[in-house]
Image (tube, rainbow, N blue to C red):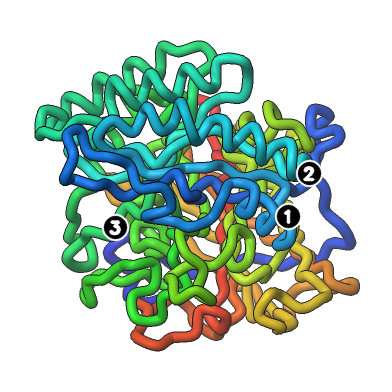
Amino acid sequence: MPRSSISPAHARRASLSLLLLACIGHAHADDAGRTWLAGDHHVHSEWSVKWDDSTSPPTPIRGGDSPYSRTRNAEEARRHGLSWMVYTDHGGPGHSNVTRDSAWPALQQARRDVPEVLQFHGMEFDVPAAEHASLIIAPGPQEADTLVDVERRFNRSEVADDSREDPEAMIAALRHMQALAPQPLMFVNHPSRTATGVGEWGRVEPAELRTWQDTAPEVLVGMEGAPGHQADRRHRGLYRNDAAKTFGGFDQMTAQVGGVWDSMLAEGRRFWITATSDSHRNADMGGADYWPGEYSKLYVHARHDADDIFDGLRQGRMFAVTGDLIDTLDLQVSTDGAAPATTGGTLQVVPGATLSVRVSVTVPSGENFNGDRNVLDHIDVITGQAGADGAPEMTVQTVRSTQWAQDGNRITFEVEGPAPRTQGFVRVRGTSTAQIEPTMDTVDEDPWQDLWFYSNPVFVEVAR
């Protein structure tokens, strides 16, 4: 998409000064001991079962939807550079019994077998009157009982009738989860997979995302920016409608500047994006998927501690990347006299302030899992704020290799620009391609030649 076509969202190119930096790091004392830890919150195992409907109730068929044990998934996650992962098996009629009797013991075994990878209990929640979401249970002694209880009470496919095909059933589920202590997390999976065109929504609509987050703001905290199933060359991400494909492997709600995600951020919503494998069956077995961490990674700035990773997911200290294009991303936004805010954080400024946006990324020096050595083509600094008509006003500054400083595999630069009028945000993205805007993915496109990263935002609020 040419940059001029962003005009419906009032985007404009800015002429911002570029200042080169030697090094950028996280600035807050509470970040002590934290580093970028790669993970995946959407992984299936053999306990994503199929069902024998000839019996009553239906009988689960182990390995029907994914052949891998949880230990095998954890081993592959470790091999592909992950520090943490979440098991999100599909539900079904009475699946809460499978969760209790089979999936939970298998998780305990996988934790013993592969202790280097922190493994979370969860499921792919069948959203009442909608589609799917990653439900992640907070670590602790309540894990097993909490998931079984939520699945049994609220999961759409837990019962064999349509009694949970009502939007109010999702509201009830979210109210219940918001009241739990500790609270679980939820990320909406592949939000535009059922869309019929660009901006023509299917089972998940932007208004629903807002309603769900309003109901449980500490639980429903984001969506998959880059869905899984990236190994399917015909339908990347399994987005099968040719009028509503992914854009550079990212969902249209995320990929379009001034689109759904930016609109929510401009409202001040702490709504984060992620990248996952949605691993069911690997491409080398004829499936549509890469192993956890093989192609998509979600980096969380955290200590190697389950609680801190969980906190990073809730607070947005994370970035999404494909193909190991980068493996660190430090984004700092500051103004004179104020400590910088970093990814997921908020900077308070005075009216008329000038923002300084400092960016540092590292490109891995070795080959990725396709055998390629990645090169960044450009990085975009994207800022937004609410416009008078409700549409977000967007500014995009593209920074190229002639404008950044590079020391080994570390790239650094700084841009400056005006603060928003009342509230806004800053985020960055980058790509291995020369595309100014990601284009809709085509049949037989090689995902390894179309790599992107997206940060989560830093919010900016102006004192009144």
Q: Are marks 1 and 2 in contact (CB under 8 Å)?
A: yes
Q: How many labels does the image show?
A: 3
State the residue position of label 2: 116
State the residue position of label 3: 192
**What's under tag 3, amino acid-wise?**
Ser
Query: Which residue is pictured at 41% across the width and 11% down the height?
Result: 179
Query: Which residue is pictured at 43% across the width and 52% down the height?
Result: 63
Q: Nearer the viewer, mark 3 or mark 1?
A: 1
State the residue position of label 1: 78
* Quarter containing the N terminus: bottom left
Q: Do the residues labelled 3 and 1 touch (CB within 8 Å)?
A: no
Q: Could you tell me how far apart the alpha carbons at marks 3 and 1 are, in whole angstroms?
A: 30 Å
> Residue 397: percent from the left, percent from the top?
56, 68
**What's under tag 1, amino acid-wise?**
Arg
Query: Which residue is pictured at 19% across the width and 49% down the height?
Result: 203
Q: Could you tell me how far apart the alpha carbons at marks 1 and 2 are, in whole angstroms?
A: 7 Å
Q: Nearer the viewer, mark 2 or mark 3?
A: 2
Disc 1 secondary structure class: helix
Q: Residue 265 appears in which quarter of the rendering? A: top left
For disc 3, the neighbor class at 10 Å (few under 14, some 14 to 19, many from 20) is many
> Residue 153: percent from the left, percent from the top?
28, 20
> Residue 285: percent from the left, percent from the top?
49, 74
Identify the mark nearer the N-term, 2 or 3: 2
> Residue 59: percent from the left, percent from the top?
28, 40
